[in-house]
Amino acid sequence: MPNDPTLERLANATLLVPFESHHAPRWVLEGLADGIAGVCLFHNNLDGPAQVTALNARLSEAADTPLISLDEEGGDVTRIGQARGSDYPGNAALGAVDDPDLTRATHRSLGGRLARLGFNLDLAPSVDVNVADDNPVIGTRSFGSDPELVARHGAAAVLGLQEAGVAACAKHFPGHGATSQDSHHVLPRVDADADLLRRRELLPFRAAVDAGVQAVLTAHIEVPALGGLGPATLTPNVVTRLLREELGFTGAVVSDAMEMRGVSERIGIPEACVRAVAAGCDLLCLGRFVYADEIAAVRAALVSAVREGRLPGERLEEAAAHTLRLRAWIRESAVHRAAAPEADGIGLSGARRAVRVDGDLPPLSDPYVVEVDAPAGMAVGEVPWGLSPWFPRTERVSPDPAHAERLLAEARNRDLVVVVRDAHRYAEARELVTRLLSARPTAVVVEMGLPVWRPDRGTHVRTYGAAHVNGRSAAELLGASGVMDAAPSGGA
């Protein structure tokens, strides 16, 4: 059996760690030198391109090709676009266009931007098939509800990112799209039979594997029909038998964030990490708030589990080997592939192509724009959305029908535009919109989430996402003056 220093280094090789600030702390740099696989960066680590590039360069110096990862899906889930919203449309918009060449080119451009900032692993794309309208965690992050559409666009996204030299990571295996709960808070359960799951949820993952995806990220969901109770991340039948043996995946298996309640609330993060590695996970994404002391506890738990015979040492060695192959792929990509050039305006072009209009869009003059607020999901975070960058006199209100009378008075003698996000999920938002349109039946409603619900009057504009470019594409249709130049911002 390996000695403790060797065991600790093998345990380190499973860790993707977060940290607190815009600068790499000493414990992270020393940990990378001592075998920690890499880092996962979040909003709190990013403050503009120059800072991010310098940070990632410092991290890269600490070890031989450490994994420098983030969740950058484009669209609603963006880290580099935190300040104003993403320059790239999300998956729902690309699925609405249904041009795989556009999806591939968009992700190649996004990957090029990530590579220039110093990232080498993107925890994207989401290849979940969103079949639950009230899904609180996927929604516009999915290419759609048709498995074949999701499969062809998921494969295109993988190819695009990896053509830019950034390893793609298809998620959330075996599929989070049929859930009506958020695994950040609880353990969702998917009660579908195995045949349906193979035809629906697994089809996009097969396509991603066939496209050569370098990593797959597991979901903290319970799928009894696939051979086990409890989170899929901790289930060998899902991670090893299904993903490895049935789908033939040979890359790195990454866990979703281990601080999420769906996986660790009952047993704690260290024990959940032991079980995830035992089930077949190679890399543990620890989440945003698991720092030095907690990471030491995870490392100690892995070492103790090997000593106690609960976790085979060979499993740690296998995990480390998968991670080394991923890092070798990244090195080879850096040598043989120049970072893909950003295609100027490709994100805005895609967002424009995605917009759909039902009804006659009237000419608008100095419209009164009302944004009906909606809570940001845990995966999205606080990213700006809406039309206020182009309509400065926009008012944002809570989804309370009692606002209707005052808003109608404010909108007197002006055209009325009402902006919503996932209105189908919020009864009060729908009631507010209905009251406004009862008095102003020619008003325009802009839906910036999934367009599941629409009122029975007025003109309905669908953007299929709330990224900056989705908002701009709607603003252009509404005749906003002074729309900014289409060039990408460079993002943080």
Image (cartoon, rainbow, N blue to C red):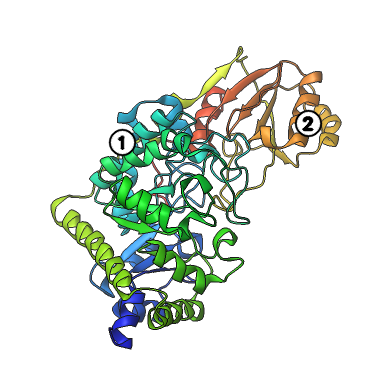
Q: Residue furthest left?
A: 336
Give percent across and percent down for residue 141: 49, 41
Asked if the residue under mark 2 is in contact with the one under mark 1, i.e. CB atoms within 8 Å, the reply is: no
User: In x, y percent, where is residue 155?
Assistant: 32, 38
Crowd rating for badge 2 (residues with CA inside 10 Å; few <14, some 14–19, many 20+): many
> How far from the left and from the top, in percent, is residue 439?
81, 19
Q: Is residue 425 left or right of residue 464?
A: right
User: Mark 2: which secondary structure?
Assistant: helix
Residue 290 visible in image: no
Given residues 196 and 258, the one toward you in this image is 196
Instruction: Calculate the distance from the C-alpha at mark 1 to the C-alpha at mark 2.
Output: 39 Å
Image point (38%, 67%), residue name: 39
Mark 1 or 2, nearer chain start: 1
In which quarter of the view is residue 404 placed?
top right
- Tell me if residue 149 comes above or below residue 249 in the rendering: above
* Tag 2: amino acid: Leu
Q: Is residue 22 left or right of residue 107?
A: right
420 with respect to 84 (left or right): right
Q: Quadrant of the C terminus?
A: bottom left
Residue at 43% across, 59% down: 255
- From the image, tell me which residue sits under label 1: 104
Question: Which residue is drawn at the image coordinates 39% and 73% (left, top)?
Answer: 311
Mark 2 lies on residue: 432
Label ID, residue 322: none
- Amino acid carrying label 1: it is Arg
